[in-house]
Image: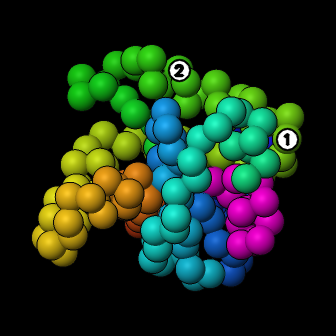
Amino acid sequence: MTVLSIEELAETLPPHAAIAGLDLGTKTIGLAVSDLSRRFATPRPVIKRVKFTRDAETLLAFAEKEKIAGFVIGLPMNMDGSSGPRVQATRAFVRNMEALSALPFTFWDERLSTVAAERALLEMDVSRQKRAGRIDSAAASFILQGALDRLASLARG
């Protein structure tokens, strides 16, 4: 596995292959998947975190089933652009994945993705109880959609 910039990911992705977005939380991993043309991000059910080995197995089984060509993982930067403990935990998670998979990872600034996801779910009149179960995957979808929009921009030149 390699950590790539979004520009490097654009150059290495095979055509017509899906990519996954991840919102790494302490209790869950939010998931989203692109369509094969990489235009739209669709939320998927969250992975309940247990311990790293089990989480990685579940994530890699998902990637194999969905034929995922790479991951875009949200990097939870502080609002002032500094790195906090969650950034360190996210980077450590990706480093630990290196021994398990050749799939590339790309970090994506996820500031305000959870806020945007919460607003979208509120606008859809999703109940508080259902929002709690869907917020991480909705955030993963916002993270992935931002990366997909950037990939489309790079393709246009």
Label 2 to label 1, Cα distance in Å? Answer: 19 Å
For badge 2, the amino acid type reads Gln
> Is 116 left, or right, of 83 in this rendering?
left
Q: From the top left corner, tell me how far across and down residue 40 is, in percent.
A: 45, 76
Q: From the top left corner, tell me how far across and down residue 33 is, in percent.
A: 56, 69
Q: Which residue is mark 1?
A: 100
The stretch in magenta equals 59-73
User: Where is the N terminus found, in terms of image quarters?
Assistant: top right
Q: Residues within 10 Å of mark 2 (few under 14, many from 20)?
A: few
Residue 36 is labelled as none
Element carrying mark 1:
loop
Compared with 133, 37 (above or below) is: below
Residue 142 picture quarter: bottom left
Q: Tell whether label 1 touches label 2 (CB within 8 Å).
A: no
Residue 88 is labelled as 2
In this orientation, does residue 73 appear? Answer: no
Compared with 109, 72 (above or below) is: below
